Image (tube, rainbow, N blue to C red):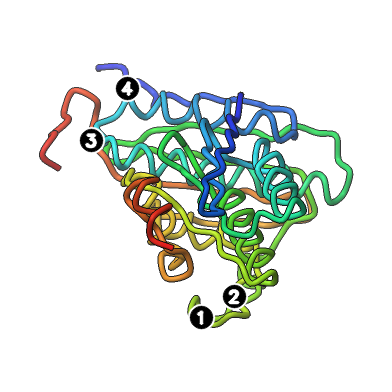
Amino acid sequence: MDLGLDVTEYDNGITVLAVRGEVDVYTAPRLREKLVELVSKGKHQIVVDLEAVDFLDSTGLGVLVGGLKRLRSHEGDLSLVCTQQRILKVFEITGLTKVFTIYESVDAATTAK
Amino acid sequence: MEAVEAAPVIELEIPARAEYVGLARLVMSSLATARRALAEERIDDLKLAVSEACTNAIEAHADVDVDERVTLRWSEGDDRLEVQIEDRGQGFDPGQLPEHPPVTDPERLNFERGLGIPLIRTLVDEVSFDPSEAGTSVRLVMFCGPADDLDVSS
């Protein structure tokens, strides 16, 4: 099972991490490593694009919560792009829609700051 | 006298390793699609609940270094489907889960784990956790009709 992780850097200092595939207990460690790597490179405004994610469970949520915590400690932020109802539902059930800023598109996320 | 057809029981054993969780949820959600009247959204719910239960089962094995398998058992009743997930870990008490701070509390970010059980409880129609010294058995129940009875409006 592949997890795609594509990084795009914008001129305004925002880094978009586009995730593709299924995020679960097997693949979530790779997402965590990528977020840690980006933060250690000084990328402190990160947008995680979940539009190509087919499945996300609580392990994936935990990694995103950990990423947000790490970025906040650097005065940064981690926001999300997601319009898929099946993925949004996981954030809604757990109340995490109140923790993350969730945008409808990468354009909206990268121009909002 | 007519013979009564026994409800099918299908078992799947997976190695207690993270890379097999995807296979387990794929098999169980495919069974739900093929055999029962369940809206797509509810199949997604079952898929996620199975994934959460299998993740817990595999972590229970890792905690005690038990190199055994996790068993998933699919069964059906007239109005329901059931997926039972059995591990051979130490047994866990769902009542002992740490409570998370409110989501608006900055302290909430210190908790990356513990979301699986609340998710399972929300996603399926019935759930029971049966911990014992031999492991934990989690039973997930979804109410539904037979596959030829799918009402797409539901």
Please name the residue that numbered disc 3 is placed on.
B145
Examine the rendering and report whether any part of residue B142 can be seen.
no
Q: Which amino acid does label 3 sit on?
A: Gly
Q: Which amino acid does label 4 sit on?
A: Val
Q: Please, which chain is the residue tagged with disc 4 on? A: B
> Circle 1 — which element?
loop
Q: Where is residue B121 in the image (x, y as percent from the top left)?
A: 45, 59
Q: Which mark is residue B102?
A: 1
> Circle 4 — which element?
loop
Q: How would you rate the neighbour count of disc 4 (Cα within 10 Å): few for under 14, some for 14-19, many for 20 or more?
A: few
Q: How would you rate the neighbour count of disc 3 (Cα within 10 Å): few for under 14, some for 14-19, many for 20 or more?
A: some
Depth check, front residue: A89 or B95: A89
Q: Please, which chain is the residue tagged with disc 2 on? A: B
Residue lying at 75% horizontally and 47% vertically, measured from the top left: A37
Q: Earlier in the sequence, mark 2 or mark 3?
A: 2
Give how far apart the Cα atoms at labels 3 and 4 are.
19 Å
Residue lying at 54% horizontally and 33% vertically, measured from the top left: B73
User: Does B105 sit above or below residue A102?
Assistant: below
Q: Which of marks 1 and 4 is nearer the N terminus?
A: 4
Q: Where is residue A19 in the image (x, y as percent from the top left)?
A: 53, 37
Give how far apart the Cα atoms at labels 1 and 2 are.
6 Å
Same subunit, tags 3 and 4 = yes
For discs 3 and 1, the disc positioned in front in the rendered view:
1
C-beta proximity under 8 Å, tags 1 and 2: yes
Same subunit, tags 1 and 4 = yes
Residue lying at 59% horizontally and 37% vertically, measured from the top left: A7
Give how far apart the Cα atoms at labels 3 and 1 are.
38 Å
Please name the residue that numbered disc 4 is placed on.
B4
Q: In which quarter of the image is residue B151?
A: top left
Please name the residue that numbered disc 2 is placed on.
B108
Q: In which quarter of the image is the N terminus of chain A?
A: top right
Give how far apart the Cα atoms at labels 4 and 2 are.
53 Å
